[in-house]
Image (cartoon, rainbow, N blue to C red):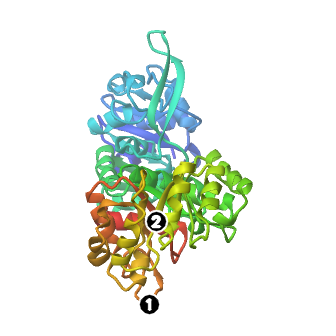
Amino acid sequence: MNKKELTKALKELGIKHGAIVMLHSSYLSLGPFDGGPEAVVDAFLDAIGVKGTLMVPVFGALGVLTDVVKKRPGAVISPCPKGTVAAIGPKAEELTRDHWKADTAHGEGTPFTRLADLGGYVCLFGVDQDRNTTLHSIEALLKLPYLSDTSATFSTPEGESVTKTWKYYPGPHRDFIGIERYLRHEGLISIARIGNAQVRLMKAKDLFDICLELGEHDPAFALCNNPACADCVRQRAAIFADSMAHEAFRLAVSSRLAGRYVPEIIENMKAAGIKYVELDYLQGKPCAKMPADKLRRAVQDFLEEGIEVSALRLMYIPSEYEAVIKLAKDSVIPRVVFPLAENSCDAIEPAQIGEIHISFANNGQDSKLAAATFQKTRLGNVPPGFTFNPAAFVKAGEFPFLTSYRQGRFIKTIEQLDLVDATWCGESAGFARGNAEVKELLSILRCHNFSGWVCLGGGAAYPGSLADAARDLAVLIENM
């Protein structure tokens, strides 16, 4: 091809005189071209005319065409060390001015959002949506929780040395390629083969409108579903953790559900975006039977990875409570969850002496017996809390929400909801797929701004992995 043929092809694609075009490009994709990279840039400038403006990203090694534009006489470079662009044309100054002053490198007040405001286009010349920097603008505008801060020291156009931090800066892998189908479905993208290059042209505002709507409904819209992609797994975890941070309750997970070994549990919890663990089993053995030094080491290993222990959980009724409470204290675990039993009062005095908070979980009793037994434990100066296990009330033949929760008047004493489900015949089930009425229980607690604990897999088995349980919870909340 030559410059004249390329100019004609760009006009047929939809680039008009006076257009503002953000160009992402691969010169090599074009194939043999008469005149080299300089002639390709000239063809774009001819297509947009003297009233048009051409803009390219120049914040890294982004191809030879970006270097050509950057070095052209009259090119304006945006004064920002992050998300830097170069522009040629009458709108160049308007697009790039004060870029460094914006709160983000790609969001409001940057060349990328101004491009949309001015009716500009994005052209992908021999590259796909993965190279479309404008999509980072949409992430920044949505303030997606997996984005991070970035800082730099640089000189302003006035020569002043400034150190600045920009919020919501993009990180690793995205599935921007998967977004294109929405543009095609709405007929908002033109695609043509020019030389050997596949070239795409779309209005920046259309891209913003579609992707902002997608992101409002699904903050993971730009992430892939590949479980082997560590980047997107981590970013999805950040989204989940952010959604849980907006809840009044604190979310924990049973160590038995999270994994068998401490490193495995840590990895799975980080992948799920959960930072509290309730220690019931490690390596298939009850944590309450572990030597204090080993349990303390496990607690420390969790803390070093940013995971806190919410409680030590017993799945059996101990003959001596004092030893368990001493184990918790020696292991720096501030709270113990015991099964409710006739001898539960024996735990009160050792817990107060050891300054360990205790909670009692229903253990197969019906709600009347559970409430009466629990009431006997609340006569001390620091009364224990109640851990409501809906699967155990199903085992007792009760509807956990319609009967147990109301009949036992646990609203006054509940400090933890074990998020587990089961059928009448005793089989474990996914959330809201059994008879434990977990959707109703969680909903009413959220209405009360419940500030206690919700524990995934607490006190009963869950029929799946921690990842499955986290997804189950997200769907449960989304449908409330």
Give the image location of residue 191, x and y in percent.
Answer: 40, 56
Provide the residue designation for mark 2: 360
Provide the residue designation for mark 1: 425
Mark 1, residues whose alpha carbon is within 10 Å: few (<14), some, or many (≥20)? few
Give the image location of residue 471, x and y in percent.
Answer: 45, 66
Q: Nearer the viewer, mark 2 or mark 1?
A: 2
Q: Which secondary structure lies at badge 1? A: loop
Is residue 232 visible in the rendered image? The answer is: no
Tell me, yes or no, whether the two marked residues, 2 and 1, touch with CB atoms within 8 Å. Answer: no
Q: Residue at 45% across / 68% down in the picture?
A: 361
Q: Quadrant of the rendered structure where residue 258 is?
A: bottom right
Q: Quadrant of the rendered structure where residue 104 is?
A: top left
Query: In the image shown, does 350 or 387 lie closer to the viewer?
Result: 350
Give the image location of residue 412, x and y in percent.
Answer: 30, 60
Q: Residue at 31% across / 71% down in the picture?
A: 408
Query: In the image shown, does 279 or 34 lie closer to the viewer?
Result: 279
Please give left or right for residue 419 compared with residue 187 in the image. Answer: right
**Kind of residue indicated by mark 1:** Cys
Quadrant placement of the C terminus: bottom left
**Kind of residue indicated by mark 2:** Phe
Q: Which mark is residue 448?
A: none
Please give left or right for residue 146 compared with residue 295 in the image. Answer: left
Q: Quadrant of the rendered structure where residue 233 is?
A: bottom right
The residue sitting at the top extreme is 159
Query: In the image shown, does 182 or 393 lie closer to the viewer?
Result: 393
